[in-house]
Amino acid sequence: GLLGLVLGIAFRDITENFLASIFLSIQPPFRTGDLLAIDDHVGYVERLTNRATVLLSLDGNHIQIPNSRVYQATIRNYTSNPNRREDFTVGIGYEDAISEAQAVALQVLAEHPAVLSDPEPWVLVESLGAATVNLRVYFWLDGTQHSWLKVRSSVIRLVKRAFQGADISMPDEAREMVFPRGVPVHVIRDGEPPAAAPTVSAPRTQQVPGETEDVTTAAEAGLRSDAGDLREQSRKSRTPEGGDDLLAARPVEPVQAA
Protein backbone atom coordinates (compact mmCIF):
# COMPACT_ATOMS: atom_id res chain seq x y z
CA GLY A 1 0.00 0.00 0.00
CA LEU A 2 1.55 3.23 1.22
CA LEU A 3 5.00 1.66 1.67
CA GLY A 4 4.92 0.37 -1.88
CA LEU A 5 3.96 3.82 -3.18
CA VAL A 6 6.83 5.45 -1.28
CA LEU A 7 9.34 2.86 -2.49
CA GLY A 8 8.04 3.22 -6.04
CA ILE A 9 8.57 6.99 -6.01
CA ALA A 10 12.03 6.62 -4.45
CA PHE A 11 13.17 3.98 -6.93
CA ARG A 12 11.74 6.01 -9.81
CA ASP A 13 14.00 8.94 -8.89
CA ILE A 14 16.99 6.64 -8.48
CA THR A 15 16.31 4.99 -11.83
CA GLU A 16 15.82 8.31 -13.63
CA ASN A 17 19.08 9.72 -12.24
CA PHE A 18 21.00 6.53 -13.10
CA LEU A 19 19.69 6.41 -16.67
CA ALA A 20 20.40 10.13 -17.11
CA SER A 21 23.98 9.57 -15.90
CA ILE A 22 24.47 6.91 -18.57
CA PHE A 23 23.20 9.21 -21.34
CA LEU A 24 25.29 12.15 -20.04
CA SER A 25 28.44 10.01 -19.91
CA ILE A 26 27.95 8.48 -23.38
CA GLN A 27 27.34 11.82 -25.11
CA PRO A 28 28.48 14.41 -22.56
CA PRO A 29 27.40 18.01 -23.23
CA PHE A 30 30.22 19.18 -20.91
CA ARG A 31 33.62 18.17 -19.52
CA THR A 32 35.34 18.53 -16.19
CA GLY A 33 36.24 22.19 -15.69
CA ASP A 34 33.61 23.60 -18.05
CA LEU A 35 31.74 26.69 -16.86
CA LEU A 36 28.01 25.93 -17.12
CA ALA A 37 24.68 27.55 -16.45
CA ILE A 38 22.08 24.90 -15.62
CA ASP A 39 18.71 26.50 -14.89
CA ASP A 40 19.59 29.16 -12.29
CA HIS A 41 22.88 27.56 -11.25
CA VAL A 42 26.27 28.72 -12.59
CA GLY A 43 29.54 26.95 -11.83
CA TYR A 44 32.45 24.80 -12.97
CA VAL A 45 31.88 21.08 -13.53
CA GLU A 46 33.51 19.09 -10.73
CA ARG A 47 32.25 15.57 -11.34
CA LEU A 48 29.43 13.44 -12.73
CA THR A 49 28.29 10.51 -10.61
CA ASN A 50 25.49 7.98 -10.98
CA ARG A 51 23.20 10.28 -9.01
CA ALA A 52 24.14 13.91 -9.56
CA THR A 53 26.26 16.45 -11.38
CA VAL A 54 28.44 18.54 -9.05
CA LEU A 55 29.25 22.16 -9.86
CA LEU A 56 31.61 24.52 -8.06
CA SER A 57 29.88 27.92 -7.97
CA LEU A 58 31.71 31.20 -8.55
CA ASP A 59 31.62 31.89 -4.80
CA GLY A 60 33.24 28.53 -3.99
CA ASN A 61 30.20 26.46 -2.99
CA HIS A 62 29.38 22.98 -4.27
CA ILE A 63 26.06 22.55 -6.08
CA GLN A 64 24.59 19.07 -6.53
CA ILE A 65 22.00 18.79 -9.29
CA PRO A 66 20.20 15.46 -9.89
CA ASN A 67 21.16 14.01 -13.26
CA SER A 68 17.54 13.71 -14.36
CA ARG A 69 17.21 17.49 -14.02
CA VAL A 70 20.50 18.09 -15.80
CA TYR A 71 19.49 15.86 -18.70
CA GLN A 72 16.20 17.72 -19.19
CA ALA A 73 17.51 21.23 -18.48
CA THR A 74 18.72 23.88 -20.88
CA ILE A 75 22.51 23.91 -20.46
CA ARG A 76 24.56 26.97 -21.35
CA ASN A 77 28.21 26.02 -21.79
CA TYR A 78 30.49 29.06 -21.59
CA THR A 79 33.64 27.01 -22.25
CA SER A 80 32.70 25.32 -25.52
CA ASN A 81 33.63 28.60 -27.22
CA PRO A 82 36.58 30.24 -25.41
CA ASN A 83 35.56 33.68 -26.68
CA ARG A 84 32.82 35.42 -24.73
CA ARG A 85 30.90 38.60 -25.55
CA GLU A 86 30.11 41.16 -22.87
CA ASP A 87 28.15 44.38 -23.04
CA PHE A 88 27.02 47.33 -20.96
CA THR A 89 24.98 50.49 -21.43
CA VAL A 90 26.15 54.08 -20.96
CA GLY A 91 24.04 57.22 -21.41
CA ILE A 92 25.31 60.48 -22.89
CA GLY A 93 23.67 63.91 -23.01
CA TYR A 94 21.50 65.03 -25.91
CA GLU A 95 23.85 67.95 -26.56
CA ASP A 96 26.78 65.56 -27.16
CA ALA A 97 27.68 64.21 -30.60
CA ILE A 98 26.79 60.52 -30.77
CA SER A 99 29.45 59.76 -33.38
CA GLU A 100 32.13 61.35 -31.18
CA ALA A 101 31.06 59.29 -28.17
CA GLN A 102 31.09 56.13 -30.29
CA ALA A 103 34.60 56.94 -31.52
CA VAL A 104 35.88 57.58 -27.98
CA ALA A 105 34.45 54.29 -26.68
CA LEU A 106 35.81 52.35 -29.66
CA GLN A 107 39.26 53.84 -29.03
CA VAL A 108 39.15 52.55 -25.46
CA LEU A 109 38.20 49.08 -26.68
CA ALA A 110 40.90 49.10 -29.37
CA GLU A 111 43.60 49.93 -26.81
CA HIS A 112 42.46 47.48 -24.13
CA PRO A 113 44.75 44.42 -23.99
CA ALA A 114 41.99 41.97 -23.02
CA VAL A 115 39.48 43.03 -25.69
CA LEU A 116 39.64 41.05 -28.94
CA SER A 117 39.77 42.83 -32.27
CA ASP A 118 38.17 39.83 -34.02
CA PRO A 119 35.23 39.67 -33.60
CA GLU A 120 35.26 43.45 -33.65
CA PRO A 121 33.69 45.50 -30.86
CA TRP A 122 30.56 47.59 -31.42
CA VAL A 123 29.16 50.79 -29.94
CA LEU A 124 25.51 51.04 -30.96
CA VAL A 125 22.71 53.48 -30.16
CA GLU A 126 20.23 51.50 -28.09
CA SER A 127 17.50 53.98 -27.17
CA LEU A 128 16.54 57.60 -26.48
CA GLY A 129 15.91 58.05 -22.78
CA ALA A 130 14.32 60.88 -20.83
CA ALA A 131 17.65 62.66 -20.34
CA THR A 132 20.21 60.54 -22.19
CA VAL A 133 21.00 58.88 -25.49
CA ASN A 134 21.79 55.33 -24.43
CA LEU A 135 24.72 53.58 -26.09
CA ARG A 136 25.36 49.86 -25.70
CA VAL A 137 29.00 48.79 -25.86
CA TYR A 138 29.74 45.24 -27.08
CA PHE A 139 33.13 43.55 -26.93
CA TRP A 140 34.68 40.05 -26.96
CA LEU A 141 37.34 38.54 -24.72
CA ASP A 142 39.14 35.22 -24.34
CA GLY A 143 37.44 33.57 -21.39
CA THR A 144 40.23 31.04 -20.86
CA GLN A 145 42.73 33.83 -20.20
CA HIS A 146 40.76 36.65 -18.64
CA SER A 147 37.99 37.10 -16.12
CA TRP A 148 34.90 38.56 -17.78
CA LEU A 149 33.87 40.24 -14.52
CA LYS A 150 37.22 42.03 -14.18
CA VAL A 151 37.52 42.95 -17.85
CA ARG A 152 33.99 44.37 -17.88
CA SER A 153 34.77 46.45 -14.79
CA SER A 154 37.97 47.73 -16.39
CA VAL A 155 36.29 48.67 -19.67
CA ILE A 156 33.41 50.49 -17.96
CA ARG A 157 35.86 52.47 -15.81
CA LEU A 158 38.06 53.43 -18.78
CA VAL A 159 35.09 54.42 -20.98
CA LYS A 160 33.76 56.61 -18.18
CA ARG A 161 37.19 58.23 -17.82
CA ALA A 162 37.51 58.76 -21.58
CA PHE A 163 34.06 60.37 -21.79
CA GLN A 164 34.90 62.77 -18.97
CA GLY A 165 38.24 63.57 -20.58
CA ALA A 166 36.50 64.32 -23.90
CA ASP A 167 33.90 66.52 -22.12
CA ILE A 168 31.08 64.11 -22.99
CA SER A 169 28.35 64.37 -20.36
CA MET A 170 26.70 61.39 -18.68
CA PRO A 171 23.61 62.95 -17.07
CA ASP A 172 21.31 61.40 -14.54
CA GLU A 173 18.15 59.88 -16.06
CA ALA A 174 16.09 61.62 -13.37
CA ARG A 175 16.78 65.05 -14.85
CA GLU A 176 14.83 66.34 -17.82
CA MET A 177 17.09 69.35 -18.51
CA VAL A 178 20.86 69.10 -18.12
CA PHE A 179 23.45 71.91 -18.28
CA PRO A 180 26.76 70.04 -18.02
CA ARG A 181 28.86 73.15 -18.82
CA GLY A 182 26.94 75.52 -16.59
CA VAL A 183 24.70 78.51 -17.36
CA PRO A 184 26.37 81.98 -17.52
CA VAL A 185 24.58 84.59 -15.36
CA HIS A 186 25.14 88.37 -15.51
CA VAL A 187 23.43 90.75 -13.08
CA ILE A 188 22.40 94.09 -14.69
CA ARG A 189 22.18 96.99 -12.24
CA ASP A 190 19.95 100.06 -12.74
CA GLY A 191 21.27 102.34 -15.46
CA GLU A 192 23.94 99.88 -16.57
CA PRO A 193 23.91 99.03 -20.27
CA PRO A 194 23.45 95.32 -21.04
CA ALA A 195 26.70 93.47 -21.49
CA ALA A 196 27.55 91.58 -24.63
CA ALA A 197 26.70 87.91 -24.58
CA PRO A 198 29.64 85.87 -23.31
CA THR A 199 31.47 83.77 -25.82
CA VAL A 200 31.52 80.07 -25.19
CA SER A 201 34.70 78.35 -26.24
CA ALA A 202 34.75 74.86 -27.62
CA PRO A 203 35.20 72.15 -25.01
CA ARG A 204 38.75 70.93 -24.56
CA THR A 205 39.96 67.50 -23.66
CA GLN A 206 40.63 67.46 -19.95
CA GLN A 207 42.24 65.14 -17.46
CA VAL A 208 40.02 63.53 -14.84
CA PRO A 209 41.39 64.22 -11.33
CA GLY A 210 42.06 61.07 -9.34
CA GLU A 211 41.07 58.72 -12.18
CA THR A 212 43.87 56.40 -13.23
CA GLU A 213 44.44 55.53 -16.86
CA ASP A 214 45.84 52.11 -15.93
CA VAL A 215 44.10 49.14 -17.52
CA THR A 216 43.57 47.49 -14.13
CA THR A 217 43.43 48.75 -10.55
CA ALA A 218 44.37 47.13 -7.26
CA ALA A 219 40.67 46.70 -6.52
CA GLU A 220 40.20 44.72 -9.76
CA ALA A 221 43.19 42.50 -8.88
CA GLY A 222 44.35 42.04 -12.45
CA LEU A 223 42.44 40.67 -15.41
CA ARG A 224 43.52 37.03 -15.31
CA SER A 225 41.12 34.15 -14.89
CA ASP A 226 40.42 33.17 -11.31
CA ALA A 227 39.42 29.64 -12.34
CA GLY A 228 42.77 28.35 -11.07
CA ASP A 229 42.07 29.82 -7.64
CA LEU A 230 38.67 28.12 -7.57
CA ARG A 231 40.28 24.81 -8.55
CA GLU A 232 42.71 25.15 -5.67
CA GLN A 233 39.83 25.84 -3.30
CA SER A 234 38.06 22.78 -4.69
CA ARG A 235 41.09 20.55 -4.02
CA LYS A 236 41.13 21.68 -0.40
CA SER A 237 37.41 21.11 0.11
CA ARG A 238 35.48 17.94 0.88
CA THR A 239 33.74 16.41 -2.14
CA PRO A 240 30.03 16.31 -1.27
CA GLU A 241 29.08 13.60 -3.80
CA GLY A 242 30.59 10.13 -3.47
CA GLY A 243 30.93 7.51 -6.18
CA ASP A 244 33.01 7.22 -9.32
CA ASP A 245 33.44 10.27 -11.51
CA LEU A 246 32.04 9.31 -14.93
CA LEU A 247 33.99 12.17 -16.55
CA ALA A 248 37.36 11.17 -15.05
CA ALA A 249 38.57 9.41 -18.19
CA ARG A 250 38.05 12.47 -20.35
CA PRO A 251 40.71 15.19 -20.76
CA VAL A 252 40.32 18.42 -18.83
CA GLU A 253 39.89 21.48 -21.04
CA PRO A 254 41.05 25.01 -20.11
CA VAL A 255 38.32 26.55 -18.00
CA GLN A 256 36.39 29.72 -18.68
CA ALA A 257 37.08 32.65 -16.42
CA ALA A 258 34.48 34.29 -14.24
Image (cartoon, helix red, strand yellow):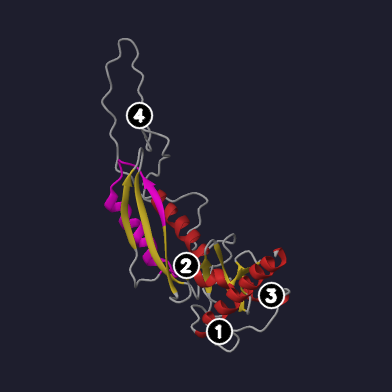
Whole-angstrom CA distance, mark 4 to mark 1, is 65 Å
Residues drawn in magenta:
88-115
Query: Residue 252 shows which numbered tag?
Result: 1
Is label 2 in contact with label 4 (beta carbons under 8 Å)? no
Dot in front, 3 or 1: 3
Q: Is residue 152 above or below residue 31?
A: above
Where does label 4 land, which residue?
A: 184
Precedes in sequence: disc 3 or disc 2: 2
Q: In the displayed structure, would residue 62 be above or below residue 93?
A: below
Location of mark 3 (residue): 241
- Find numbered disc 1 in the image and state the secondary structure of the residue it sits on: loop
Look at label 2 and name its amino acid: Thr
Q: Are marks 4 and 3 in contact (CB under 8 Å)?
A: no
Q: Nearer the viewer, residue 164 or 240?
A: 240
**Amino acid type indicated by mark 1:** Val
Q: Would residue 46 be seen by someone viewing this image from the given angle? A: no
Q: Which residue does the image show at 36% across and 54% down from the upper left? A: 136
